[in-house]
Amino acid sequence: MRTRIVIIGGGPAGNTCATTAARLGAEVVLIERDTIGGAAHLWDCIPSKAMIATGNARSFLRRSVRMGLSEVESDVDLVQLRERLRAIETRLEGSVRSLLTSQRVELIDGTGHLVGPRTVVATTADGERTLDADIIVLATGSRPRIPDWVEVDGDRILSTRDAYPPSSVPSHAIVVGSGVTGVEFVHMFESMGAEVTLVVSRQHVLPQKDAEVAAALEEDFLRRGVRLFKGARATKMERIGDEVVVSCDDGRVATGSHALLAIGSIPNSDQLGLESAGVVTEGGYVPVDDQLRSNIAHIYAAGDLSGRLPLSSVASMQGRKIAEHAMGAYSHRQERQIDYDKAASAIFTEPEIADVGLAETDAFSEGRKVRVTKVPFSSHAKALINDDPRGFVKIVSDPATGVVLGGSIVGRHAAELISILAIAVTNGLTVTDIHESLLVHPTLAEALAEAAE
């Protein structure tokens, strides 16, 4: 008898779990209320990066005169941009749906909730349908956190999901929140021609990142005219006519045409009926073990709901691991668990930022002996050819063995270049392995080999 797996949520975790489980012989039902591909395709990762790409193109045109071209001006066409985002979403969803249907995954457009430890009720436009399951996978993601001191109107006061794209290009955008999402919006709005003020509750942006990396981004923001309210926590946000006023706890006030909240997210667990199935939650998240199981062994959680590293790449890997574990794919070989400390991440500002593994500041705070090497892109031909010498490569390694423990990259294409270090960190490669690789010249990747020398 085939194993029946019911998955609630069709984002990166859910759809990857579905296709993997189907290939392994499971009968799979996937329930999704919005877009197959989830919030990553509909609101977050994909549309944000598409808008950033538009802003980057505009920035490139503005500096093209330095590369021997006549000066070109370009304004943002929101109608065309909105159509572009919709086209990308449609094409990506179509690709994922085709893959799922080719694997004979049953797709249900609707919502799902548990009414017992092995029973899921799917609610669709045609009514309710009860599904019995051997395995249940919860992958419902998260939504923006909105504090009680602000009322989001979707026009001038925006959550992140109201801004892809906004109804109009801001003349002055106030961004509240200086984490990954916040700084990406700062870059996006500024590159589209807006003045930007960033409210930073800490003493520097990106408080969870390497301080030198954060400083490099701050320096570039200031060069571009971004105003930083450091050490300020927003306490009030109100719309007055066509202006938005943001008040901070230190008395400072910012006034702009738009304000955007980027202060984290909360898990989508409140409508899942978890109590009826006996699933334990903590702060709305579903705690999981190394195999992504909840306290109920046949109920798994993945993606943002699991409370682990909230990255699409991690969610996809979790979905695959769940399917393999549930279907016994490891019966003849050693299971390889996810090491979240070795996950690569990137921030799509300009310059881009990416890191993986052990950070220099964390190593020193833990008292670990490490070797840190840093090479600026300004000394490399490709950076000069690109007319963009900003940033650097930093590699953290074990001084005794040369094993690569981590690294950070600031600069053009950092999100692509970090893959080299990610492979090294994951597989225990040494700096010698990188340095003795014959890389293409001229490329930015040569800075990695030089830093590894």
Image (cartoon, rainbow, N blue to C red):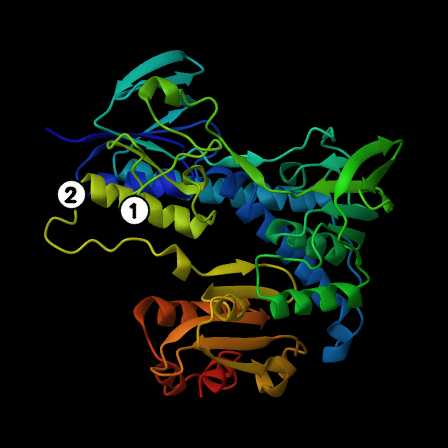
Residue at figure coordinates x 80%, y 42% from the top left: 249
Q: Is residue 76 left or right of residue 343?
A: right
Q: Nearer the viewer, residue 331 or 78?
A: 331
Q: Nearer the viewer, mark 2 or mark 1?
A: 1
Q: Earlier in the sequence, mark 2 or mark 1?
A: 1
32 w.r.t. 257: above or below = above
Name the residue rendered at 62%, 57% in the picture: 207
Image quadrant where one finds the N terminus: top left
Give the x, y percent position of residue 289: 31, 42
Report helix, strand or loop for mark 2: loop
Left or right, residue 324 beside residue 392: left
Can residue 38 be seen by looking at this rendering? yes
Q: Amino acid at mark 2?
A: Gly
Give percent across and percent down for residue 430: 35, 80
Image coordinates for residue 102, horizontal then vertical, percent: 28, 39
Quarter placement of the C terminus: bottom left
The foreground one among 211 and 21 is: 211
Is 50 on the left or on the right of 58, as rendered?
A: left
Reading the image, the residue beneath label 1 is 290
Binning the other alpha carbons within 10 Å of mark 2 as few (below 14), some (14 to 19) or many (20 upward) gives: few
Q: Amino acid at mark 1?
A: Asp
State left or right for residue 114 relative to residue 268.
left
- Numbered badge on residue 328: 2
